[in-house]
Image (cartoon, rainbow, N blue to C red):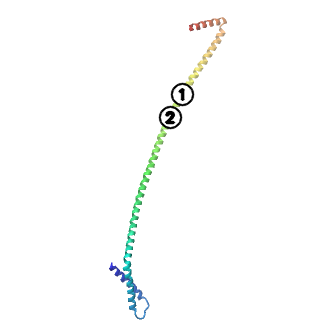
Amino acid sequence: MKGKMLLIFMMIVMIASSAMAAEAEHAGGDLKDWAFKVINFAILVFIIVKFLGKPIKNYFAQRKELIEKSIRESQEAKELAQKALQEVEEKLKLKDKEVQDILDTAKKIGEQEKIQIVQESEKLKEKILEQAKTNIEFEVKMAKDALRLEAAELAIQLSEQKLKEKITPEEQEKLLQESIKIIEGRKN
């Protein structure tokens, strides 16, 4: 430490002496004047080193520690930020995968529901066609029965009309009496 101080002192003296040498000449006492300035300067340096040396040294040591600490904290913060960024990116990838899985599942469910709806509509169509066929068969049967009934009534009317034309009133009375006897015989 003392070697450094001596080196600094010597450099300052050399700089000061070259600055003094550049001045204009003075008459006499140049060496005394120069020695006095050097001694004053040496005393100033000694006082500065003696009284401000440790505080300056401590200040720079503390400043160095503070800067190193700030650098370490910055590096730690950077590492934490990078780690957090990686975690967020991983979570985003997982979320993207989850979203894709949800979309795929929804698509599959939609396809299944579509197939189910088509199958149910086919069943309903078959049921409606069967019901329509049954209704048509029933209506045809009813129409046939109605036609038979009407045909029978017409046949009876035609028969009755022909009988009336061919049967005399006496024969009519006779048929009526026979019919009454037959009906009475059935009741008993």
* Image quadrant in which you'd find residue 165: top right
**Quadrant of image for the N terminus:** bottom left
Residue at screen point 46% across, 42% down:
109
Above or below, 179 relative to 145: above
**Quadrant of image for the C terminus:** top right
Amino acid type indicated by mark 2: Glu
Q: Which mark is residue 84?
A: none
Q: Pick whichever, 17 or 29, lies toward us.
A: 29
Gap in Å between the C-alphas at discs 1 and 2? 16 Å
* Image quadrant in which you'd find residue 52: bottom left
Q: Pick whichever, 165 or 3, lies toward us.
A: 3
Residue at screen point 44% across, 51% down:
95
Question: If you read the primary sequence from the N terminus, does the residue marked by circle 1 or circle 2 appear first?
Answer: 2
Residue farthest front in this picture: 51
Is 166 positioned to the left or the right of 122 in the image?
A: right
Residue at screen point 60% across, 20% down:
147
User: Residue 61: where, in percent of width, then height?
Assistant: 37, 72
Helix, strand or loop at disc 2? Answer: helix
Report which residue position mark 2 lands on.
Answer: 122
User: Residue 185: where, in percent of width, then height?
Assistant: 57, 7
Amino acid type indicated by mark 1: Lys
> Around disc 1, counting alpha carbons within 10 Å, would you say few (fewer than 14), some (14 to 19), or many (20 or more)?
few
Helix, strand or loop at disc 1? Answer: helix
Above or below, 71 relative to 119: below
Is 161 positioned to the left or the right of 97 in the image?
A: right
Residue at screen point 38% across, 71% down:
62
Give the number of callouts.
2
Q: Pick whichever, 106 or 22, lies toward us.
A: 22
Q: Pick whichever, 132 or 90, lies toward us.
A: 90
Q: Are marks 1 and 2 in contact (CB under 8 Å)?
A: no
Report which residue position mark 1 lands on.
Answer: 133
> Around disc 2, counting alpha carbons within 10 Å, would you say few (fewer than 14), some (14 to 19), or many (20 or more)?
few
